[in-house]
Image: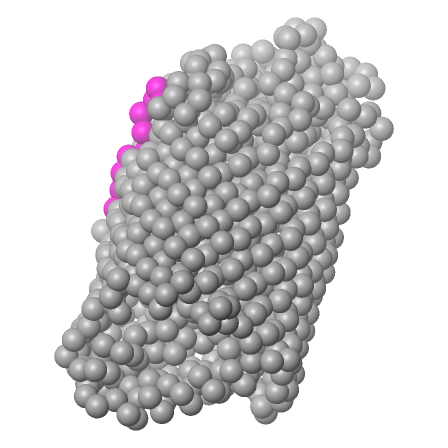
Amino acid sequence: MTRLRALKSALLATCALLPTAAFAQQTLQTIEVVGVSPVQGGEIAKDKVPSNVQTMTAQDLDRTRTPSLLDGILQSMPGVSLSDQTGNSFQRDLDYRGQTASPVLGTPQGIAVYQNGTRINEAFGDVVNWDLIPEMAIARMTLQPNNPLFGLNAIGGAMSIEMKNGFTYQGGEAQLFGGSFGRMQSGAQYGWNNGTYSAYIAAEGAYDRGWRDYSSSSHVRRMYADFGARGDTTEFHLSFTGADNKLGSVAATPIEMLNQRWSSVYTWPQSLRLQMQMVQASLKWAPTDTLSFQANGYYRNYKSSRIDGNGTEVEDDGAGSFVIEDAAGTQWGINRNGPVANTLAADTALGQIDRNTVKTSSYGGSLQATSTTQLFGHDNHFVVGASVDHGNTNFQATSELGTIDNSLFVTGLGVYIDQPNAGLAPVNLNAKNTYLGVYATNTFDITSQLALTAGGRFNWAQINLRDQTGFAPLLNTDNNFQRFNPVVGLTYKITPNMTAYAGYSEANRAPTPLELGCSDPNNPCLIDNFLIADPPLKQVVSRTVEGGLRGELSGGSSAYAAAPPPYRKAPIKAVAVDDGWKLRWGISLFRTENSDDIIQVVDPANPLRGYFKNAGTTLRQGVEAKLDLTWNRWTAYANYTFIDATFRSAFDINDPVLGPLGVVSGNHIPGIPAHRLKLGAEYAVTDAWKVGTSINYVGSQYLLHDETNMGPKVPAYWVVNLNTSYQITKNVEVFGLIQNLFNQRYYSAGTRFDPAGFNTAGGGTAFALNDPRSMVPGMPLAAYAGIRAKF
């Protein structure tokens, strides 16, 4: 804290000596710092980071503007978009530069996510469960492209989340809001410190019955607590994060059904329960003004349980028994212990209930040192560190034969499918992950305007799979991946208000246990449910080149240096004392090439089955541009992103409708819209009353699993939202939100499926359709209102 107090005093003293308001405007720019590694404590001025790093604070997550964490990220961060595979607003995908952080098993994950320096991509599939993060307790979020120091999965970027504590947040707050589709959500937080000790706690709960037919309701419960202590040179924190969520899902629905009824669903039930407890400890020690050490450790316990009603491959063999075919077309009884008789009516549609559970215990930690000692008389910022993460996962899955009624509900018959010869048998797998990383980065001020950053990280990953059933010994594999990923970049302050930057970096992603266990095209498996013996996959390696300009303009106001909040990473800002305007802007060009990219391929014989494969080289390149304006009573923003995402290698693929086809260089990667535009403005009608609006436009995209680009696209769409708030008293505020004001009908995502229908117990088909497009419909008009009180 000694350095921070000295910096604050120096800034205040400088302000007192400024001769004119105009000079103050020119000299006092916003000094914003961002982390250069997952562990907090190695922060550096944002203007010296050679990439389009983006930040958002707790104020940007204000419930008066957005109803959820992901909606807040969407509105505040250029280049970010949301997609939906589950039909649940708590379980959406975050997409950035054509890479994804998704809660859906089987989705290739290209973004690393950290909470207080702990990697929270789950060990088994690297998934990110956004609903497990206590939103109210978030202090700040930073999105980092072009930085391999964040380890595995940072091929598209990394999201670092800093949580509140009693030193950074004091007082209390409670809020309640609700509205359409039975949504009720509440939360409370309280922070305290006496200068030496601190305490903070936040708790949230939410209920949403969903708007789709037969959709299961969602219950969210989560909390965060932190206890801290600090002295002149040390600071220690012990925190706990817990969540117990039950989430209903309604996945993509055939477009023919949606044309008849917008809220219709295709096979159910679909539900998910997530439970998580995580304990973290962190220590910071600054023995001198230029040297500090940071350390953290964690233990995380995670469990997911999924129930999913689907169609089935099971059919009648013509002799009164249920059978299932292998990849070669040979029929086998559905149970290895003997035939199962078909006693159902001939017109009964057959289905199955797929269940899986993931139980993971993980632990690890990091150690880091930061030095700001000058080098050869020039400012220098050096960070070096190491991390270790270990996960132990048990994965189990079963399929129960069932029947499908007229509402497409699947009812289990108590008969479990157990036929390993057809690749469908109960699974009990143990997976152990060990990830080690050693990293260093250095930023050297060549001149007062020019800074050079260079560094890198060595990643080592070991993934061991062990079958626990005794019937799948070929699943027992040991896999090792290692790589050194460099980063280098320059920033140049062209004027006090404008900075240019350019950088190059590399990153890697190791295949997940799920991908390693499902990669044989001759033996496709049920995606996210079953694993079989497979050939090994290669790791994905990305190479990114990025360059851009950022800056700000202002006028019409004098300024003074605002005292920062009492924590090290707080920005020190120039604050206007009378009416004026400020325009912040930025533009970035990027090009990321992935070698040995991993994709999910659907089996044409059965769209429920598939496998993962290395698809050669892929390319994601584009432009990000943003404008943020504050003027008198107005605040406004405009963000635009263009992404050209293509395959650069030719390979064969199986289309679930058209059969075997070839992908050629230049085909677009499905599920990535080329154009994204976000506009928003808010006006203070009075000092107490504000009104605002936002517009989100998403361009067209190819359907998932349409790598050949043969089918029609998911159409482009736009959505308008409104918000308003009124400050009744200093401590009490009411607010209202309207989403999808014009009740637009749009599709948030889409995929290809086989419309042939379901097998019947008599050998025929039921519920056959014609159009192979299956879509996730966007939520219709929704309105919410709430109240917030501070004390």
Q: How is the image coloured?
A: one colour
Q: Position of residue 402 (x, y in %)?
A: 64, 28
- Residue found 65% across the figure and 18% down from its top: 523
Q: How many marks on residues?
A: 0
Determine whether 559 is above or below 246 in the image.
Answer: below
Q: Main secondary structure of the magenta part?
A: loop
Q: Give the residue furthest to the right.
A: 470
Span of residues in magenta? 709-718
Q: Is residue 63 visible?
A: no
Decide which of 229, 67 is in the foreground and name it: 229
Q: Is residue 624 visible?
A: yes
- Residue found 72% across the figure and 50% down from its top: 390
Q: Position of residue 165 (x, y in %)?
A: 56, 77
Q: Position of residue 476 (x, y in %)?
A: 78, 30
- Residue found 53% across the figure and 49% down from its top: 148
- Residue found 59% across the figure and 92% down from its top: 194
Q: Quadrant of the N terminus?
A: bottom right
Decide which of 123, 413 is in the foreground and name it: 123
Q: Give the residue furthest to the front.
A: 376
Decide which of 725, 374 is in the foreground and name it: 374
Is 712 colored magenta in this rendering? yes
